[in-house]
Image (cartoon, rainbow, N blue to C red):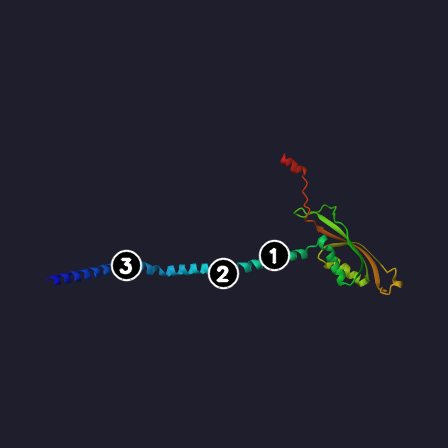
Amino acid sequence: MAKDNKNNKKVSGALVAAVVVIIAIAAFVPTVYMPYKNKKPEMDAKHQEALDTIEFYEESIKNQDAIQAEIDDLTAQWEQYQKDMFVDPQTALKDVNDGITKLDITLTEFKQLDPVEDPSGTVTAEGNPLYYQSIQVQGRCTRDQLLDLLRYIEEDSIGAYYVKKLEASPPRQMARDTDISEDDLEFKMDVYLYYFNQSVIKTPETTDTDTDSAA
């Protein structure tokens, strides 16, 4: 009889455990599994979105050096374009000389004088005053070369120039110089470069109206 009681107890314990498991499964399915199953597509979509975002930023970090190098290169190009588009006393001689060199003109004198502020008092919106600088050129060339030089200075060069004075005549020493052609001319040219001096900012003068309003 004792053995039968032990078997009954074992059977009862196994049955209880089975019932507990069934109850746990029954509770797990509606409370955990089904909500998870219903929300899984949305969770997967958010997970993929997070992965895509992480990948985007990782690629951005990898390409940061390349992007910065490209920015530096574009900045250098822009600064060079700015220099090429603007002529001031530091670049005027080179600008005029480029045209003279292309035309194969023989120079005997080439110099520039100190800049002078234009008496008109013209200024830019930022207050940069207008200046001019005299560039004096002497040399020898043919009539066609001289006309081409004038065209370059007034039309094709980068700077804003005005030919203030031009004198041309046949060479005085033509008979003793075999290198001088009968078609050559000796010329003197005074060219004015006009530019707005960015290193000098004019302070606007106070008018009577400004004084009255301030009072």
Q: Which residue is mark 2?
A: 59
Give the secondary structure at mark 2. Answer: helix
Mark 1 Cα-neighbour bin, 10 Å: few <14, some 14–19, many ≥20? few
Which residue appears farthest toward the top when viewing the image? Answer: 215
The answer to whether residue 130 is left or right of residue 68 is right
In the image, residue 129 sits, relative to residue 108, either above or below, namely above
Lateral position of residue 152 relative to residue 184, left or right: left
Q: CA distance from mark 3 to mark 2?
A: 42 Å
Q: Position of residue 170 (x, y in %)?
A: 86, 60
Using the numbered discs, state the Cα–Cα distance from disc 1 to disc 3 in whole angstroms: 64 Å
Amino acid type, label 3:
Phe
- Quick one: label 1 or label 2, which is nearer the N terminus? 2
In the rendered picture of this protein, how many numbered marks are placed on residues?
3
Report x, y in % for residue 76.
62, 57
SS of the residue under disc 3: helix
Circles 3 and 2, Cβ within 8 Å, touching? The answer is no
Name which residue lies at 65% across and 57% down. Answer: 80
Please tell me which residue lies in front, 152 or 197. 197
The image shows residue 155 at horizontal and vertical percentages of 73, 58
Residue hosting label 1: 75
Residue that lies at the very extreme toward the right in this rendered image: 175
